[in-house]
Amino acid sequence: AQSVAQPEDQVNVAEGNPLTVKCTYSVSGNPYLFWYVQYPNRGLQFLLKYITGDNLVKGSYGFEAEFNKSQTSFHLKKPSALVSDSALYFCAVSATSGTYKYIFGTGTRLKVLA
Amino acid sequence: ETGVTQTPRHLVMGMTNKKSLKCEQHLGHNAMYWYKQSAKKPLELMFVYSLEERVENNSVPSRFSPECPNSSHLFLHLHTLQPEDSALYLCASSQQRTGSYEQYFGPGTRLTVT
């Protein structure tokens, strides 16, 4: 069965510092991995994805994520956090054999402190 | 997010009412989804339509009835709901198979069942 774990409910980071939001997954076969961000009273917004190829993927707003197959992880990173990055972040996975079925993590609230 | 619209944005209904949620995507995608988002729970996939045919139905109670009349429109018909159905209902679309797979979400309908 597919699953996604986001072990931290909340991450606090000072503005200008690097940030990491963690995600681990379990899926049969090769995963499709995604990160989304949700601002208050808004839907989820796509940030980046890993389908195949280079393990380091770059996305919107300076975010990047590294696919690590041996650790089954797909952590979201940004070198320098902004206060405007404060939001709810979701990791999602889809197995290549069933690409309609996306499993989302419970979300991690990122708080960037000025 | 602006490519997927949802109406209404807010809905309050009694348990005996019948109402419908509407979703429209302007992205030319071939798959559409309904999700339920409740506080402190993972995003729950409810229904998936691909090319107007339902391909996923995740054990959703029959008081929720989806309809996909064409590739751009998706409805969720609601009747005799329970208070625990109060949540944010999100619509999403994606381009599958020959596409890029990431989902684009609407802003959601905040449903309150009284």
Image: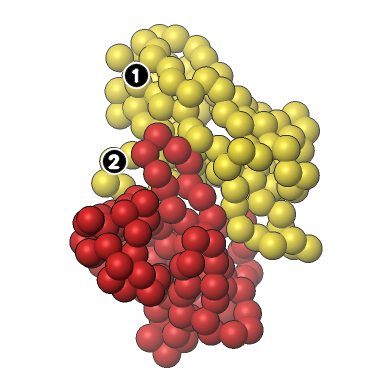
Chain colours: A red, B yellow
Identified by mark 2, the residue type is Ala
Where does label 2 land, which residue?
A: B39
Q: Nearer the viewer, residue A13 or B52?
A: A13
Left or right: where B75 falls relative to B40:
right
Q: CA distance from mark 2 to mark 1?
A: 15 Å
Query: Left or right of A86: which side holds A101?
Result: right
A4 in relation to A38, above or below: below
> Where's the N terminus of chain B, which quadrant?
top right
Residue at 36% in and 32% down: B87
Asked whether residue B110 is in view, the answer is yes
The residue that mark 1 highlights is B113
Question: Quadrant of the rendered structure where residue A95 is?
Answer: bottom right
Residue B111 picture location, percent across and down: 40, 24
User: Comparing marks 2 and 1, which lies closer to the viewer?
Assistant: 2
Residue at 61% across / 64% down in the picture? A98
Residues at marks 2 and 1 on the same chain:
yes
Which label was assigned to residue B74? none
Q: Could you say which quadrant of the image residue B106 lies in?
A: top right
Quadrant placement of the C terminus of chain B: top left
Q: Residue, x 75% and y 48% (percent of image)?
A: B30
Q: Is residue B26 above or below residue A98?
A: above
Above or below B45: residue B81:
above
Q: Nearer the viewer, residue B46 or A78?
A: A78
Residue B97, x across and y down, in percent: 75, 62
Please name the amino acid that badge 1 sits on. Answer: Val
Q: Earlier in the sequence, mark 2 or mark 1?
A: 2
Looking at the picture, tell me which residue is in the foreground, B78 or A74.
Answer: A74
Other residues around mark 2 within 10 Å, as few (<14) / some (14–19) / many (≥20): few
